[in-house]
């Protein structure tokens, strides 16, 4: 069984070490329209120069109910480095996620291009390879994920479109197939240190059916 608490102590030590140049705390709640599931997470983001890292804790109510008998729904630690080359930003990283049944490591590489001809417009792509290692004797699940993002910022407003494609190795993800997809749109208002946002996503409900549902998220970020 994985020692989650011990690892979180190490993560906490990393988050407070060094001279932090930028930091934020983010609170987000989500609701899935058909299943009726609620979930909440708290995330702390920090950076030291080009090095960035974050830690988050996830919670949900019993049987997915809203803020009822809250339970630990896992944690995640992310770290990476930003290389800036003219209009390009290259970001290798390694999120690590822990849940009751095991741990997932997610090595990834993201490339972002900021347009000079259209102020505020960015395009980015990311490749991620997930390795889920179970706490029992099950084999490791492996999944590929390709993400494309379009972002646009004007004055205090930020708009985003994200498209994800998934492919598993040897198991089903959606509609009895080893592939899946997910699309999200987001709107953020950032007039100062406080930044509220909403996000709407088209997500699958089961690996065995073709049912999909709307996932709605609302959150707020405080930067300091």
Image (cartoon, rainbow, N blue to C red):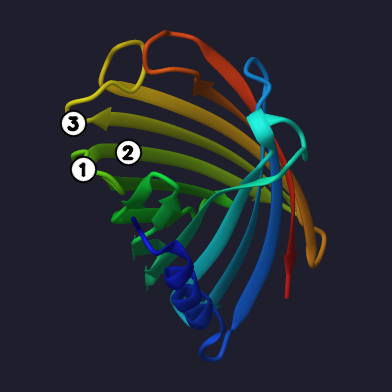
Crowd tier of the residue under label 1, counting other residues whose Cα lies within 10 Å: few below 14, some 14–19, many 20 or above: few
Above or below, 213 against 43 in this view is above
Specify the quadrant that holds the C terminus.
bottom right
State which mark lies toward you, 2 or 3: 3
Quickly name the residue at label 3.
Answer: 169
Nearer the N terminus, badge 2 or badge 3?
2
- Gap between marks 2 and 3, in whole Å? 14 Å
Task: Check the image and name the residue furthest to the bottom.
Answer: 19
Quickly name the residue at label 1.
Answer: 137
Label 3 sits on a secondary structure element that is loop
Label 1 sits on a secondary structure element that is loop
Nearest the camera: 172 or 186? 172
Nearest the camera: 81 or 7? 7
The image shows residue 222 at horizontal and vertical percentages of 75, 65
State which mark lies toward you, 1 or 3: 1
Nearer the N terminus, badge 2 or badge 1?
1
* Camera sees residue 112: yes
Quickly name the residue at label 2.
Answer: 146
* Camera sees residue 38: no
Specify the quadrant that holds the N terminus.
bottom left
């Amino acid at each position: 069984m994985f020692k989650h608490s011990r690892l979180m102590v190490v993560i906490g030590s990393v988050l407070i070490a060094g001279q932090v140049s930028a930091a934020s705390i983010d609170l987000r709640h989500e609701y899935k329209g058909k299943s009726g599931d609620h979930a909440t997470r708290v995330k702390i983001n920090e950076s030291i120069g080009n090095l960035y890292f974050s830690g988050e804790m996830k919670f949900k109510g019993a049987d997915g109910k809203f803020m009822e008998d809250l339970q630990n729904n896992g944690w995640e630690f992310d770290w990476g480095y930003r290389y800036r080359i003219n209009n390009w930003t290259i970001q290798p990283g390694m999120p690590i996620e822990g849940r009751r049944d095991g741990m997932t490591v997610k090595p990834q590489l993201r490339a972002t291009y900021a347009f000079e001809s259209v102020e505020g417009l960015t395009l980015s792509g990311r490749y991620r390879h997930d390795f889920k290692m179970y706490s029992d004797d099950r084999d490791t699940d492996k999944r590929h994920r390709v993400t494309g993002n379009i972002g646009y910022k004007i004055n205090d407003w930020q708009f985003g479109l994200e498209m994800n494609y998934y492919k598993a190795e040897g198991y089903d993800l959606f509609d009895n197939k080893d592939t899946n997809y997910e699309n999200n749109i987001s709107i953020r208002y950032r007039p100062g240190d406080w930044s509220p946002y909403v996000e709407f996503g088209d997500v699958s409900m089961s690996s065995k059916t073709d049912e999909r549902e709307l996932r709605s998220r609302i959150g707020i970020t405080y930067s300091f």
